[in-house]
Image (spheres, grey):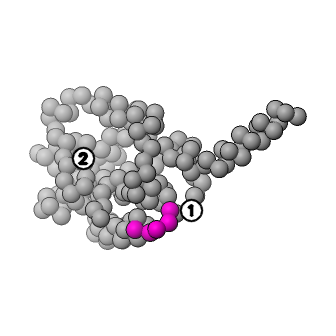
Amino acid sequence: MQINATLVNLYNVCKRELWLHANGIRFEQTSDLVFEGKLIHEESYPQRSEKYEEVEMDGIKVDYYDAKNKVIHEIKKSNKVEKAHEWQVKYYIYVFERKGIEGVTGKLEYPTLRQTDEVVLCDVDRDMIREIEAEIRKIVESDTCPPLVRKGVCRNCSYFDFCFAEELEVTDSLDKKGEND
């Protein structure tokens, strides 16, 4: 199994979503928030596509890469899961290094917040990425989906209805019961 930056991101957000996504259960195509994120990516820096290139290799897809200055640019809608975004960019840098491209840094850009964060990869991070890759393999190769862990980001997740279906059914039946009283 090839680890990719999406899995590294999900590892830092939700182990359940990581397992579901890696095992082909995906709901992103129905999410308005995911669509909004794609629009922000496409429309925030229109001049970038002329100047920088999108890079795909070894399971990663970098939004923009400034080859001259060796800077990876990753555009995100919100910084609610900033740690996950940071590890995603660190993973990009890690993959570049594995390909022999040294001295790469990253920039996390949140256009709607007008915020930019620098990202660098250090030796401790490289060790942590190897541990994360091993953990991801263990989670993904498990026969069972990790249990539900309620988090603040759940409400806006494209998997919300899937994860909370039973809870929604109970709420709906309680609402209907109240209507008949």
Residue depicted at x 33% and y 45%: 108
Q: Which residue is mark 2?
A: 62
Q: How many callouts does the rendering have?
A: 2
Left or right of 164 in this view: 176: right
Residue depicted at x 13% and y 58%: 101
Magenta stretch, residue numbers? 141-145
Residue most extreme to the right:
181
Q: Specify the quadrant that holds the N terminus.
A: bottom left
Residue depicted at x 71% and y 40%: 172
- Type of amino acid under label 2: Val
Select label 2 or label 1 by which is in front.
1
User: Crowding at label 2, few (<14), some or many (≥20) Cα neighbours within 10 Å?
Assistant: some
- Type of amino acid under label 1: Pro
Q: On screen, 179 above or below 105?
A: above
Q: Which residue is mark 1?
A: 147
- Compute the Cα span from label 2 to label 1: 31 Å
Please state the horizontal and vertical placement of residue 168, each as a whole percent of the image: 66, 44
Q: On screen, 131 above or below 71?
A: below
